[in-house]
Image: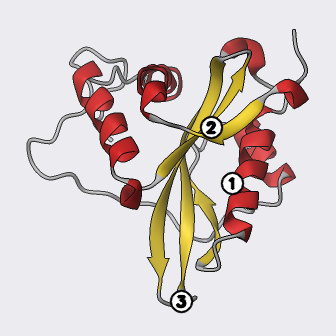
Amino acid sequence: MAHPESLRIRKAHAGDADHIAAFNRAMAWETEGKALIPELIAAGVRRLLAEPALGFYAVAEHDGEVVGCLMVTNEWSDWRNGLFWWIQSVYVTEPWRCRGVYRRLYDFIRELAQSEPGVCGFRLYVEKENTTAQRTYSSLGMAPTDYLIYEELKPGVRYFEAGARSDDDS
């Protein structure tokens, strides 16, 4: 298998939408046992790609095949007078895991942020039990915060199919 340095890291474009949607479905199933609604995640990916104000995706590709991705969205911090880039929807295909793909994607995001004076830092959330990912994020200089994440969905909002392994709809 090829070395991670052979990867091309770039911002995603509309032609990557199907890969990204499939990656998001795989990630949700692997990490949370949720079967995302295919039409909904596909529409969500396409919308972000069409509306840059919402954020962007970065992809890692090898020989024209997309093997990993992540999404970046914005959070305004009035305390810092700057934007945090939230890293979300991280996925790397099985053969490329633990080979530095996420590191390459993260370095790409860091480099992009250097040319954006309004960006003050990066944030992400990770499942409490995903210690492998936590070690990776720590090795790149990220640190856990003192904050927990809470959410409330509007009544009727569904994003995964009935029959998923998880009993909650978080």
Name the residue type under label 3. Asn
- Taking the image as drawn, is residue 31 in sight? yes
Q: Are marks 2 and 1 in contact (CB under 8 Å)?
A: no
Give left or right: position of 79 versus 154.
right
Name the residue type under label 2. Glu
Residue position for label 3: 81
Residue position for label 1: 109
- Taking the image as drawn, is residue 32 in sight? no
Q: Position of residue 110 (x, y in %)?
A: 74, 59
Q: Earlier in the sequence, mark 3 or mark 1?
A: 3
Q: Nearer the viewer, residue 125 or 42?
A: 42
Residue drawn at the location 71% of the way across and 39% of the way down: 133
For the C terminus, which image quadrant?
Answer: top left
Name the residue at the top extreme.
1
Task: Give the color scheme: rainbow, by chain, secondary structure or one colour.
Answer: secondary structure
Tag nearer the camera, 2 or 1? 1
Q: Secondary structure at mark 2?
A: loop
Asked if residue 59 is positioned above or below residue 76 in the image, the reply reads above
Q: Earlier in the sequence, mark 3 or mark 2?
A: 3
Q: Position of residue 1 (x, y in %)?
A: 87, 9
Q: Nearer the viewer, residue 68 or 98?
A: 68
Total labels drawn:
3
Asked if residue 29 is positioned above or below residue 69 in the image, the reply reads above
Figure quadrant of residue 37: top left
Q: Earlier in the sequence, mark 2 or mark 1?
A: 1
Name the residue type under label 1. Ile
Disc 3 to disc 2, C-alpha distance: 33 Å
Residue drawn at the location 69% of the way across and 60% of the way down: 112
